[in-house]
Amino acid sequence: MAPKIDPRTLTKSPKRCVTACSGFLLACLLAFTLQIFFFSPISPDLLKLPPPSSASLLPTNTYLQRVIKLGEGHLKGPEDVCVDRDGVVYTASRDGWVKRMHRNGTWQDWRKIDSHALLGITTTKDQNSLIVCDAEKGLFKVSEEGVTVVASHVNGSEIRFADDVIEASDGTLYFSVASTKFGFSEWYLDVLEAKPHGQLLKYDPSFNETSILLDDLGFANGVALSRGEDYLVVCETWRIRCLKHWLKGGRKGETEIFIDNLPGGPDNINLAPDGSFWIAILQFRSDVLEFVYNSKASKHLLAAFPKLYNLINPVYRSAMVINVAADGNIIRKFEDPNGKVMSFVTSAFEFEDHLYLGSLNSNFIGKLPLRVE
């Protein structure tokens, strides 16, 4: 004879199941929240971006869609580009190769550095070598003889995130450290944290010493010397501005704002032949990002899930470079507003009436004619 079943147990079992499931889900949610907030890699501050300057009032254009593609398919994320006096184009690719294109258009895998984090490059004054920033190891000198380390430590600490470099006529090197806390693969964490971990460093070849010129910079990025080398300009990416640091004259050692309230975050900067500067601008402005910058909870969430940050980050969907006069006024603006041809442009170098453009999101260098016949 089958046992009798109490109908009351049939109603209690589903309730117990729902209660158990709810408790489990609540525990998972609590653990998830604790993981995001209490084990977060960042300790963020809120970031209030200033309104953009007059550059945003210049008409939107599509000039960057006119670029000639150099080395397409041969390059991988060429972040920076420079051209020597003989017209040889140099860049450093994500595969660790320093590559160059000769006048006849042929490309050469010139020197290999065991790194995926090669960033800013510059030719030396004697034109016989390059200085290359490695975001993991410091500064390298690259020449026909090979690759040697120039600077790897400052004040006893390893240089963590060397970003851009320029050489003065006396051989002194000025270079930026984007962040002393986060590495190249974690650059977005520095932006989300919005605390100043950047530095401007000076390497003196006479004493083989590296020293700190400026500290507490907001993601120190591009570095350029003025035509007279009386001051240099360093870009602060998430502060949306560039600083001027005086090297000579009565104001030597002083620092002031060169240009601020930019339409986006300044990346690399290069001196133009006429004494003005070319600055690559990263699109850090959008309604979604404005919300994130002012929400610590959102920052923690994106820090835990970087792919979400990439989805909402417009740097991968647009490109902009601006030309800024020596007095800090914007002269020209070139764009690819929807990233049709170029996006995430990180550097712009002028040579013989052409602009050479590097990008972390391209497999080529863009070459843009500056004169229209």
Image (spheres, helix red, strand yellow):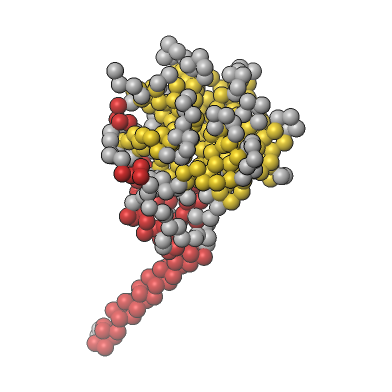
Quadrant including the C terminus: top left
The furthest residue to the top: 104
Residue located at (27% from left, 39% from top): 59
Residue 205: tell me if it is visible: yes
Does 109 sit left or right of 55 as displayed?
right
The furthest residue to the right: 207
Q: Quadrant of residue 60?
A: top left
Which sits in the foreground, 262 or 204? 262
Q: Is 124 drawn above or below residue 94 in the view shown?
A: above
Residue 113 appears at what percent x and percent y? Answer: 57, 28
Residue 44 appears at what percent x and percent y? Answer: 50, 60
Does 72 sit left or right of 189 as displayed?
left
Residue located at (39% from left, 75% from top): 23
Residue located at (33% from left, 26% from top): 67
Disc tally is 0
Residue 168 appears at what percent x and percent y? Answer: 62, 29
Residue 354 appears at what percent x and percent y? Answer: 39, 22
Q: Quadrant of residue 220?
A: top right
Which sits in the foreground, 327 or 232? 327
Q: Is 15 drawn above or below residue 135 in the view shown?
A: below
Quadrant including the N terminus: bottom left
Which sits in the foreground, 74 or 123? 123
Residue 347: tell me if it is visible: no
